[in-house]
Image: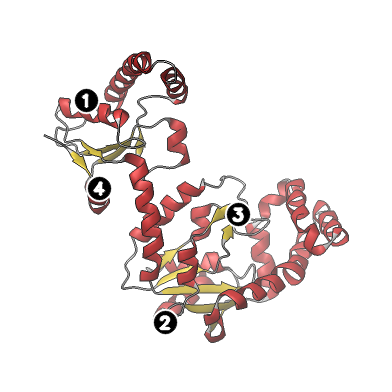
Amino acid sequence: MNYTVSVGEAVAELDRFDALIDVRSPAEFAEDHIPGALNWPVLDDRERHDVGLLYATSPFEARKLGAALVARNIARHIEASAAGLPKTWRPLVYCWRGGQRSGSMHWFLGQIGFRSRQLVGGYKAYRAQVRDDLAAWPARFDWRVICGRTGSGKTRLLQALAAEGAQVLDLEALAAHRGSVLGALPDAPQPSQKAFDSALWSALRGLDASRPVFVESESRKIGRITVPDTLLAAMRGERASCVWIAMPEAARVELLLQDYGHFAADPEVFCRALDGLVELRGHARVDDWQRRARAGDWATVFAELMREHYDPGYERSLRGHFPALVKARTVELADGTAPALRAVARDLLDKP
């Protein structure tokens, strides 16, 4: 009996599989995988390289070597991970293009008696599905775009809205970046573009198109990640609406001191990031900000960066990209504390 499923069938019942088993090498898995998948590589990175190298000169010898390696690795995975699984366990198994690697794991699991399914076309088919869905899905939603100057608590407000039950798409969280020259997170590297696309696809897949979705105004690039044009077009389109968050400057500085406090432990990282502003602000201005940062005068640095760099550029960009901004509802946010954020979130939900 042929226990294979197309990518359309797999996506439609993705949550009904007991496990998603990605049998590609660890490096392939690290670049991107179906969200929630487990990595049971049938060839590790070095083994895959060696078999591929041998295949170029002798396909037959490469298949012999590959078969022995795959069999040993599958045995190891079964011993380590399958011992306590019931016969009714139903995994979806995939490799790069639905070939021999996933076929081998699928066959072994089926021989044991598990209800294994193999993904036709493998990761390659899944990736094509992600591209197609990201081109189509954003237009389905009623976007509520949170706008405001740097440090006005937009990301925190998204989190407060989510806590109150609103639908939220946090693009900066998906991209592991705060979206500015200083936005790299100290403890989390950015994902690959493909991994970001998968995370975005998974997030959109979980949204209800009959309810509004709150999202922060973003540029096309978040660090080195590119936001799909179709999503940007939907956020900036006629159906979208904007909310302008107004926060006093002193409170904005305090919020930035909290969010970027990690720079105090290593001011040179901050200073190197500021080098990216030399072309726009000139050596003298950037040198002064770097001198103040090294001296620990962070409040002055952030206040001047807001007034002289972020605010003018941000507002020019917003006016050009978000036509709905002229009709935006303005909401006053006193500071970045939990009570203030919770009150504004509730107000936005009570008076859409």
Check disc 4 and report its element: helix, strand or loop. helix
- For the point 71% across and 46% down, the residue is 265
Residue wearing tag 3: 223
- Residue ranking furthest to the front: 57
Task: Indicate which disc, 4 or 2, sits on the residue closer to the N terminus.
Answer: 4
Q: Please state which of the two labelled residues, at mark 4 or mark 3, is closer to the viewer.
A: 4
Q: Which mark is residue 10?
A: 4
In the picture, measured across the screen, residue 139 lies left or right of residue 102, that is right
Residue wearing tag 2: 352
Viewer-closest of 308 and 7: 7
Q: CA distance from mark 1 to mark 2?
A: 54 Å
Viewer-closest of 300 and 22: 22
Amino acid identity at mark 4:
Ala
Task: Indicate which disc, 1 or 4, sits on the residue closer to the N terminus.
Answer: 4
Residue wearing tag 1: 108
**As drawn, 69 above or below 254:** above
